[in-house]
Image (tube, rainbow, N blue to C red):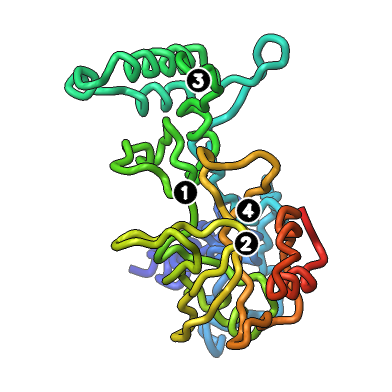
Amino acid sequence: MANLPSSSGMLFRLLSNVFSPSIVSKCSASGRWWPQPARRFSTKPDEISSLERTSNDKDVIVTPAQGIKLSKSDAAPVYYKPKSTGPGYELVEHKKGELIANYTLFEAAVNKAKVPWVNYDGLTSEERSIHMAHMRAINDRKLTYLDPKTGYTVFTISHHLKRGKCCGSGCRHCAYELSKHRSRAPSMGIHRRTRLEVVDNSALGKEANTTGKLPYCIHVYKQGRRAKHMPHAELGDKILVAIRGQMRKAYVVGANTHVHYRKHGVPVTDKNMIVLLDEEGNPLGNRITAPIPTKLLANRGNVQFAKVLALANKFI
């Protein structure tokens, strides 16, 4: 029993092998990227605590930084970059600088322009010729084609897909389900319940435009009224509108006329614009904030309308 080594000596040699510099790895760095100084715990009985760090340099083992090189820029998180940010509809250059649809846009247009046989069987000969002309243009990846009957230039469905949103004109090959056959002809002007935008600087008009509840037409002061039929208001006509719970008279100074009813030399605005009038027939504001068509100058003979024209400083 006397020849056996003491238990304290065996424990000391065991701990010395475990915490030797050749065995210490990055795991002893407490999860940090950079190496931390390793500690060797003493097993001497005269020590106060085996967990206290001694001031002896031999008890501190510093692990050399071998192969650990990491800058702050490399340590920053790297996020996944998506392959594409959209459907990938692009235009590529073709012969003589002509822009045509790429393959992704061509494939989407073909799938969108398919017509079931049940629907195709009910088309007339004229509609079938238009459909075939449209499909030939899509196969050639073109954005327009010529109408076989009228000879007008018509946009293909590839053009509408590239646009990304509906233009609101009721196009023939609209890709957003707005190309349904009309049950009636397009409106020839402003009629009942047509929304309008106030372009003067009156407080009532500003309130209506900012709240999003635009005024709408409820009556047109124009000859031609009959039972259940109200004449359509055009540029320069006087109408009655409902705005913020009130009824006000107004003059039409801008009309979004349908493409089938536009007149040569008369500009078309994006929205139907009006100028509000007070109870005496004078303009409610003192300035028109949008340009108005020059054709309205022909109505300067009307005293009330001449006051409206005096507020405008931009004409188109």
Whether 243 is drawn above or below 225: the answer is below
Q: Nearer the viewer, mark 3 or mark 1?
A: 1
Q: Is residue 43 left or right of residue 184?
A: right
Identify the residue at horizontal 68%, vertical 51% (top origin): 74
Q: Earlier in the sequence, mark 3 or mark 4?
A: 3
Separation of marks 2 and 1 at Cα, in angstroms: 15 Å
Could you say whether the residue bearing mark 4 is in a helix, strand or loop?
loop
Q: Residue furthest left?
A: 118
Residue wearing tag 1: 188
Whether 265 is drawn above or below 282: the answer is above
Q: Earlier in the sequence, mark 3 or mark 1?
A: 3
* Picture coordinates of residue 37, whole percent (x, y): 65, 66
Residue wearing tag 2: 236
Q: Amino acid at mark 2?
A: Gly
Separation of marks 3 and 1 at Cα, in angstroms: 40 Å
Residue wearing tag 4: 269
Q: Nearer the viewer, residue 54 or 313?
A: 313
Could you say whether the residue bearing mark 3 is in a helix, strand or loop?
helix
Asked if the residue under mark 2 is in contact with the one under mark 3, i.e. CB atoms within 8 Å, the reply is no
